[in-house]
Amino acid sequence: MPATLEAVLVLLVFLAPGFIAVRVKNSLLPYRIPSAFQEAVEAAVASTILLPVW
């Protein structure tokens, strides 16, 4: 169980910057409402780009 909790926390730390960036972008540019899958993929891509900066 602790390994699972650690994995979830690590995943959260790696994906948080992307989800924050996507939420901010979607609030500033409300041209469409993305599906949950589109938002998750965009957050994962943004996280890989923003992780070295963060």
Image (cartoon, rainbow, N blue to C red):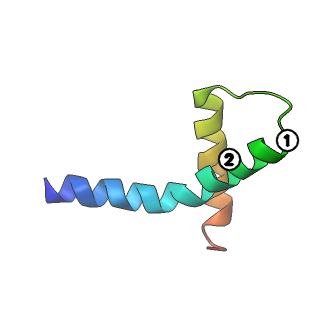
The quadrant holding residue 37 is top right
Q: How many marks?
A: 2
Residue at the spot 58% in from the left edge and 38% down from the top edge: 40
- Tell me, for residue 23, which label it has, or none: 2
Query: On the picture, is 3 further left or further right than 49?
Result: left
Q: Quadrant of the C terminus?
A: bottom right
Query: On the picture, is 46 further left or further right than 5?
Result: right
Q: Are marks 2 and 1 in contact (CB under 8 Å)?
A: no
User: How far across and down, in percent of the image, does residue 42 sit?
Assistant: 67, 42
Type of amino acid at the residue the image marks with label 1: Leu
Q: Is residue 52 above or below residue 33?
A: below
Residue at the spot 65% in from the left edge and 49% down from the top edge: 45
User: Marks 2/1: CA distance?
Assistant: 10 Å
Secondary structure, mark 1, is loop
- Tell me, for residue 21, which label it has, or none: none
Residue at the spot 63% in from the left edge and 55% down from the top edge: 20
Q: Earlier in the sequence, mark 2 or mark 1?
A: 2
Residue at the spot 60% in from the left edge and 50% down from the top edge: 19
Q: Is residue 25 above or below residue 50?
A: above
Identify the residue position indicated by label 1 in the image.
29
Type of amino acid at the residue the image marks with label 2: Arg
Q: Label 2 crowding class (10 Å Cα cut-off): few <14, some 14-19, many 20+? A: some
Query: On the picture, is 43 further left or further right than 29?
Result: left
User: How far across and down, in percent of the image, does residue 10 sit?
Assistant: 38, 61
- The outermost residue toward the left is 1
User: How far across and down, in percent of the image, does residue 13 sit?
Assistant: 46, 62
Secondary structure, mark 2, is helix
Q: Label 1 crowding class (10 Å Cα cut-off): few <14, some 14-19, many 20+? A: few
The quadrant holding residue 53 is bottom right
The quadrant holding residue 31 is top right
User: How far across and down, in percent of the image, does residue 18 sit?
Assistant: 62, 54
